[in-house]
Image: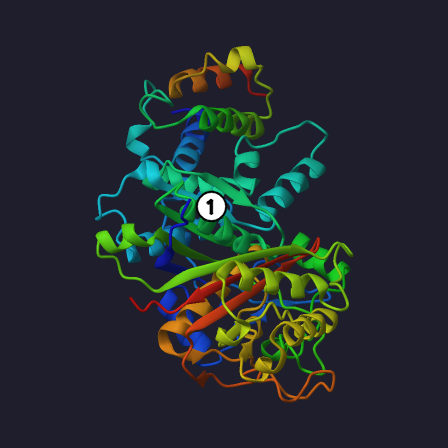
C-alpha cells in the first residue's frame, strides 16, 4: 500500500472511529463506514490539511469511497 | 384553567465534589472543597491558577470516541447527568409517551473550549478558512438539549435558556411552567458548563470577578467571610426530571420533592454589578413566594447565590432581610458555592439539587471557609458556617443571579402525600 493510502486509512480510522479491517478501497464513507454529511466534509478537510491540497467542492462530491480518496490524492498531492 | 402540580422524580450530578448525585451529597454534607490547581491548561501566567474542576472524568466511560469528539465538554457533561437522571426516574422502563417529554437545558456560555480552539487554529493559519464542520454544532449552547433529545427520542418542547449564571434556574422555571400548563408530562431540565479554559479564566480575571488566592485554593471560595475576594470558577452539570404529579403517581415514580414556585426579575442596573440595595434579589424572592402562594415564615432554608464576591454577597443578604424580616433569623442560609465553586449556567441546577437533597435528608449543607466575621452582616443570621446542620427542611428556596442583572428563584417543598 502506498504511503498516501496508509495516511488516508489512518485519518478515516481516527475520524470515523471504525476498525482498520473495514477500511477497504471499495468502502463508501456514508454507506459502509457510518459517516453523515458533516463527517464527510470533515474528512475532506483533513485530507486537504494532511496532503496540503485544496479540493474544490465539485470534485469533493465525487470522493465517496476510500479508493476514490486515495486515487484523487495520489494524483493531486504535492 | 387549573394549573397542574409538578414534582421532581429524578436527579443527576457531575460536580467538582463528585461525579454522581450520591458522591455530590457526600461532598456537600461533609463540607469538602472542590478547588485545586487548574489541570485543563497551563495557567502559570494567569492571575488565577485554580478552579473547581470535575475530577477523574473519562469521556470514554460514557461515549465512544467518535461521539465524544463531536461534543464539547459542556454537552458531554449534559449527556452524563441527563442519563443519570433518566435512569434514576426510570423513564425508559415506564413506557411513557416520548412526544410528551421535553428537554429544557441551561448553559451560560456553551462550547467555549471549541470556540477558542477553532479561532486559534484560524489565527495560526494563512487566512484560508479551514473551520471544522462540527465547530458550530459543537459550540452553540442549545445543542446540549438537542443531543439529549436525540439519544432518548424525547420529542416534546426542546430548547436552552441563556441568562448567564441564572441559566439553569430559568430552564427549571420554564419546565415547571410548561408542565403546570399541561404542555408536557415530563421535562429533562438542568444545566451544564465547561468554561475552565484560557478564555474563561482570562475573561473573568479581566472582570476582576475571580478570587486570586493562589496560595490556598481550597479556602478561596469563602462567601460572607470578611476576606472574600471573588468567586472560584467551577465546571460540571446537574439534571432534574420534572414531572406532572398525577403522571408520576400513576407510574409509581419515586418523588423527591414538589416544585411550588418560580420567580424572575431584572436588576435593570448594571451589566455585571448587582443592584447595591439588592432590589432585583428582593423582587425575585417576593415573586417566587407569591407564585407559590406561601408565607415567608414557611421557608426553612435558602441556598443563596452567594458567590463570594465583595458586592454580591452584601446585596443578597440585604434583600433576604427585607423579604423575611425577623424570620430571617430562623432560616438556615448557605452558599454551597463555598464547596463547588461557581458553575455559571449550571449553578442553578446543582444548587436546586442541593436544596432538594437538604429536604430529603433534613440536613443543610454548610458555607465552608468561614474564618473572619464580616461586620456588614447581622450576626443573628445563620449562614450554616463550616459544618452541615441538621434541621427539618420542609421548604427550600434556591437563588441564582446572572450577569446582565437576571435574577431567578425556585421553591421546593417536601412531598407529604
- The residue lying toward the viewer, choosing from B65 and B92, is B92
Residue at the front extreme?
B1
Determine whether the residue tagged by mark 1 lies in a helix, strand or loop: strand
Q: Which part of the image, by quadrant, shows the N terminus of chain B?
A: top left
Q: Quadrant of residue B116?
A: top right
Q: Which part of the image, by quadrant, shows the C terminus of chain B?
A: bottom left
Q: Residue at x 65, y 77 (%)?
A: B321
Q: Residue at x 60, y 20 (%)?
A: A54
Residue B41 shows in this picture: yes
Residue B15 shows in this picture: no
B352 relative to B383, above or below: above
Color style of the picture? rainbow
Chain on which label 1 sits:
B
Query: Total marks drawn?
Result: 1
Q: Residue at x 69, y 66 (%)?
A: B210
Find residue B89 and report its horizontal and vertical position in percent.
29, 55
Q: Residue at x 74, y 70 (%)?
A: B311
Identify residue for label 1: B104
Find residue A53 and report its horizontal and vertical position in percent.
59, 21
- The residue lying toward the viewer, choosing from A5 and A67, is A67
Find residue B288 and report its horizontal and vertical position in percent.
55, 61
Q: Quadrant of residue A66?
A: top left
Q: Residues within 10 Å of mark 1 (few under 14, many from 20)?
A: many
- The residue lying toward the viewer, choosing from A12 and B266, is B266
Find residue B195 and report its horizontal and vertical position in percent.
59, 55
Amino acid at each position: 500500500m502506498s504511503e498516501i493510502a496508509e495516511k488516508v486509512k489512518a485519518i478515516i480510522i481516527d475520524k470515523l472511529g471504525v476498525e482498520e479491517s473495514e477500511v477497504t478501497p471499495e468502502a463508501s464513507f456514508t454507506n459502509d463506514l457510518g459517516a453523515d454529511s458533516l463527517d464527510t466534509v470533515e474528512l475532506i478537510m483533513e485530507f486537504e490539511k494532511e496532503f496540503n491540497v485544496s479540493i474544490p467542492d465539485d470534485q469533493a462530491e465525487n470522493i465517496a469511497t476510500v479508493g476514490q480518496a486515495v486515487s484523487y490524492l495520489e494524483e493531486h498531492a504535492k | 384553567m387549573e394549573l397542574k402540580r409538578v414534582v421532581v422524580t429524578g436527579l443527576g450530578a457531575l460536580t467538582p465534589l463528585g461525579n454522581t448525585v450520591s458522591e455530590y451529597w457526600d461532598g456537600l454534607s461533609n463540607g469538602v472543597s472542590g478547588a485545586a490547581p487548574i489541570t485543563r491548561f497551563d495557567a502559570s501566567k494567569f492571575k488565577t491558577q485554580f478552579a473547581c474542576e470535575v475530577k477523574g472524568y473519562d469521556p470514554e466511560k460514557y461515549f465512544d470516541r467518535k461521539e465524544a469528539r463531536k461534543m464539547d465538554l459542556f454537552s458531554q457533561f449534559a449527556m452524563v447527568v441527563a442519563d443519570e437522571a433518566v435512569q434514576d426516574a426510570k423513564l425508559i422502563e415506564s413506557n411513557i409517551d416520548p412526544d410528551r417529554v421535553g428537554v429544557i437545558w441551561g448553559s451560560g456560555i456553551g462550547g467555549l473550549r471549541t470556540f477558542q480552539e477553532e479561532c486559534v487554529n484560524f489565527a495560526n493559519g494563512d487566512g484560508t478558512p479551514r473551520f471544522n464542520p462540527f465547530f458550530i454544532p459543537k459550540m452553540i449552547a442549545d445543542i446540549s438539549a438537542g443531543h439529549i433529545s436525540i439519544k432518548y427520542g424525547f420529542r416534546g418542547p426542546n430548547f436552552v435558556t441563556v441568562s448567564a449564571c441564572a441559566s439553569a434556574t430559568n430552564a427549571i422555571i420554564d419546565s415547571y411552567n410548561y408542565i403546570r400548563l399541561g404542555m408536557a408530562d415530563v421535562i429533562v431540565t438542568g444545566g451544564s458548563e465547561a468554561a475552565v479554559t484560557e478564555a474563561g479564566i482570562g475573561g473573568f480575571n479581566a472582570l476582576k470577578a475571580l478570587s486570586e488566592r493562589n496560595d490556598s485554593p481550597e479556602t478561596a471560595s469563602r462567601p460572607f467571610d470578611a476576606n472574600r475576594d471573588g468567586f472560584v470558577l467551577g465546571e460540571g452539570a446537574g439534571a432534574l426530571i420534572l414531572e406532572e404529579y398525577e403522571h408520576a403517581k400513576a407510574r409509581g415514580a419515586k418523588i423527591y420533592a414538589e416544585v411550588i414556585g418560580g420567580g424572575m426579575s431584572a436588576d435593570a442596573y448594571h451589566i455585571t454589578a448587582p443592584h447595591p440595595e439588592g432590589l432585583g434579589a428582593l423582587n425575585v424572592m417576593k415573586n417566587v413566594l407569591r407564585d407559590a402562594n406561601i408565607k415567608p415564615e414557611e421557608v426553612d432554608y435558602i441556598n443563596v447565590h452567594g458567590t463570594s464576591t465583595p458586592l454580591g454577597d452584601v446585596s443578597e443578604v440585604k434583600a433576604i432581610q427585607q423579604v423575611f424580616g425577623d424570620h430571617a433569623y430562623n432560616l438556615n442560609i448557605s452558599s454551597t458555592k463555598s464547596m463547588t465553586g461557581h458553575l455559571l449556567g449550571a449553578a442553578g441546577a446543582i444548587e436546586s439539587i442541593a436544596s432538594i437533597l437538604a429536604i430529603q435528608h433534613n440536613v443543610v449543607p454548610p458555607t465552608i471557609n468561614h474564618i473572619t466575621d464580616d461586620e456588614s452582616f447581622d450576626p443573628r443570621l445563620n449562614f450554616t458556617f463550616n459544618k452541615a446542620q441538621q434541621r427539618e427542611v420542609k421548604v427550600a428556596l434556591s437563588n441564582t443571579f446572572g450577569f446582565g442583572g437576571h435574577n431567578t428563584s425556585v421553591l421546593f417543598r417536601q412531598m407529604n402525600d
